[in-house]
Image: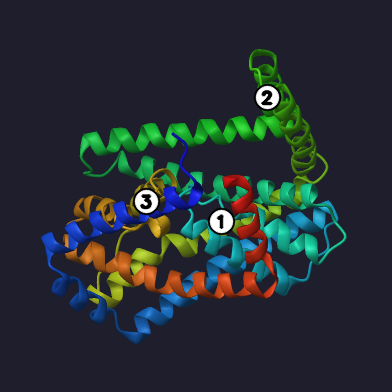
Amino acid sequence: MHFSRKTTTIVSVIVGLVILGGILWYIGPGNVINQVITLGWDGFGVIILSILGMFTFWTIAWIVIMRGYGVKAPITLSFWARIGSFAVSYLTPSMHFGGEPVRALVIERESDSSYSRIFATIVAERISMMTALVAAIVMGALFGLFSKIPKDTLLYLILISLLFVALLVTLIVNFYKKLFLFTRFIAFLKRHLPWTEWIEKAESIVKHLEQEINMAFGQHIKHTFIAFLFDLVATIFMLMRPQIYFYYTQGRLFSIIELTMLFALISILSSLFWITPGGIGISEGGLIGIFALFGIKGSEAVAYSFSIKVVEFFFVGVGLALLARYGIMNLLFQRGKESES
């Protein structure tokens, strides 16, 4: 049975809301509201600044890679494109990659570069960002070895860290050594599957894209490394979110070990279990389990999630408005209808 993207999204929203409703019923919505109020306007203000800082350094990293590729795009436009892609990814149950084509569309409309080259810069920047993320996750796993984290949790953390590292190393080696693993895989599928015409088109697109991305790890390794440094700074802004929230609500100061472990666990939750728009329900349930390891109540964990979501929803709204401004929303809807027909 074939389900359209619209149907799948609606079902995921319903599932997420049901899970969230069950969580709120169990811990009490009043407790959550009281915790959110405790954050105060100053706390919300600092969280907004941290998210702005994250977007800013993400955008700078991407601009550095685009400059290496010869893609000329205004800084402001690049920032808005980054916000727009975040908005689509946030609402798409696709592990945060659903909005990346949006970035390419926005820049393509305002530059002389091809869509494939622009998209290659995005993939290269995502690999750079993933490298920074993995560095923090691995650090969290290493710190976990010397802390009182439950053995089962530590085992999962280490195994998932190794999985992330293996994936990252595979991607980097593939592009740096020009192995064209993805092109070879599609060529293998073409030899063994009946949909030859469709697979040939995919093979051509993937091969061209891999050739473009190889430039980031060959001709433009300097730009890629500089982008990685900026992505590290953006990662620090992400890492500090729990510290900001619980400092303003409880006056609590986490140790570096606790912060890196929190970041590692939250990153894994966000990366692997983003199966509802905005992570509704799934993120709250996961955060309850994660924060429980640090002696934080379920109501406080859900309040943290809600506080972050309030700020993120603001940026989602801004991103969608900007996409409408550039006419990208209409284009996305048209593509969605074509894919369903």
**Of residues 259 and 280, which is closer to you in this image?**
280
Q: Which residue is mark 3?
A: 12
Alpha-carbon span between mark 2 and mark 1: 33 Å
**Marks 1, 3: nearer the viewer:** 3
Q: Amino acid at mark 3?
A: Ser
**Marks 2, 1: nearer the viewer:** 2
Say left or right for 235 vs 202. left
* The label number, if any, that marks residue 20 in the structure image: none
Quadrant of the snapshot with the C terminus:
top right
| Secondary structure of the residue carrying numbered label 1 | helix
Q: Which residue is mark 2?
A: 186
| Secondary structure of the residue carrying numbered label 3 | helix
**Of residues 65 and 275, which is closer to you in this image?**
275
| Secondary structure of the residue carrying numbered label 2 | helix
Q: Which residue is mark 1?
A: 232
**Marks 3, 2: nearer the viewer:** 3
Alpha-carbon span between mark 1 and mark 3: 32 Å
Q: Residues within 10 Å of mark 3 (few under 14, many from 20)?
A: some
Q: Amino acid at mark 1?
A: Leu
**Residue 296 in view of the camera:** no
Q: Residue at x 36, y 48 (%)?
A: 269
Q: Amino acid at mark 2?
A: Ile
State whether residue 56 is above or below residue 163.
below
Q: Quadrant of residue 297?
A: bottom left
Q: Residues within 10 Å of mark 1 (few under 14, many from 20)?
A: many
Q: Residue at x 70, y 27 (%)?
A: 199
State whether residue 35 is above or below residue 272.
below
Quadrant of the snapshot with the N terminus:
top left
